Amino acid sequence: MMNWDSWILENEITIRLVFFFGIFAVIAMWELILPRRSLRVSKGLRWLSNIGLVFLNSLVIRLLFPTAAIGVAVVAQNQGWGLIGYYQLPFLLAFIMAVVVMDLVIYLQHVLVHAIPVLWRLHRVHHADLDFDVTTGARFHPLEIVLSMLIKFATIVLLGPPVVAVVVFEVMLNVSSMFNHGNIYIPEKIDRVLRLFVVTPDMHRVHHSVHAPLTNSNFGFSLPWWDRLFGTYVAQPRENHQDMEIGLDIFRDPKQVNRLPGMLKLPFISTLGEYSINRGR
C-alpha cells in the first residue's frame, strides 16, 4: 500500500491535470455546440480573467501547501489518524464513507461562506460573474481557496480516509464543478433523472440567480442529496433558464467583476448587499 501511496503522491499533479484539461475541453466544446443560454459578456474577457485567477490560485496553493490534500492524507494514514484509521474499516466501506463525508463537508462549507458576512465577501467573487459557464466553476478568490484547503486538511486529519479516496474526491470535485457550471443544454427529462445522482447545470444555475433568496439554495457541488435533506433545494429559477439573470445586483459592471484586478478587490468593497444569509449583521 505504501508503494501505491507513493505513486499517487508523485503523480498527483499529472492525474489532476489530465482530468482537468480533459473535462474542461469536453464541456467547452459542448458549450459551443449546444449552449443552454446566450452569454451576455464577452467570452474572451471573462475567460482571460477567470482562467487567470485559476493560475494565480494554483500558484498560491503550491507555494503555501506543496503536498496539498494528498500529502496530508498519506501522513494521516501512516500515523493512523482519524475515525477510519482508528476503527480499521474495510477498504470499500472506508472509501465510500470518505467520499460521501468529504462531499458533505463541502456542502456545509458552502453554506458557511454564505452565512458569515466576512466569508461571503470572499465568496461573492464566485457569484459576481455576469455569465455562467465552465470557467465560473473555478472562479474563486485566493483567500477563499486557502480557507477551503485548510478545511479540507482538517477533514482529512479527523476522518483518516484512504489516500485513493482523497484522489478520487479531488478529481470528482473538479469534474463536477466544471460540469455543473457548464453552459450546456441537457434535455429536461434527462436532467430530472441526472439530478437524483449528481448536481446538474440547471440545478446549480439557480444558485447563481441574481435574486437573493435563490442564491441561498442548491449549495451542493457533486452529490445533490444534501440540499433535499437540509431543505435548501429549489428545482427551478423564477424565470426560465434562458432569461434568468446571473450574478449579484450590486455588481453589474463587467470592468469590475470580469477583470482580474476588480475581482481581487471585490471582498474589500464595503457594500455587503442582500445576499449573505445573515445580511443584517
Image (cartoon, helix red, strand yellow):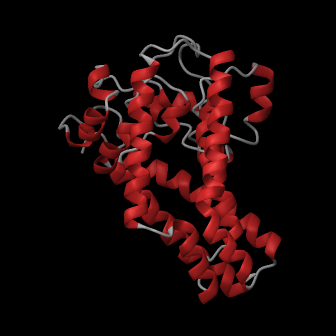
Q: Quadrant of residue 83?
A: bottom right
On the image, the x and y values in percent for residue 261 come to 26, 35
Q: Is residue 224 left or right of residue 52?
A: right
Q: Is residue 222 left or right of residue 215?
A: right
Tell me how many marks there are.
Answer: 0
| Residue 35 in sight in this render | no
On the image, the x and y values in percent for residue 19 come to 66, 47
Give the residue displayed 36% in from the left and 45% down from the top: 141
Q: Quadrant of residue 29?
A: top right
| Residue 163 in sight in this render | yes
Name above or below for residue 46 compared with residue 38.
Answer: below
Q: Quadrant of residue 45?
A: top left
On the image, the x and y values in percent for residue 43 come to 46, 20
Q: Residue pushed farthest left? A: 270
38 vs 274, nearest the viewer: 38
229 vs 176, nearest the viewer: 176
On the image, the x and y values in percent for residue 227 come to 61, 43
Q: Is residue 109 left or right of residue 242?
A: left
Q: Quadrant of the N terminus?
A: bottom right
124 vs 230, nearest the viewer: 124
Give the residue displayed 49% in from the left and 33% down from the top: 136
Q: Is residue 186 left or right of residue 140?
A: right
Q: Quadrant of the C terminus?
A: top left
Give the residue displayed 76% in from the left and 19% down from the top: 187
Give the residue displayed 48% in from the left and 49% down from the top: 110
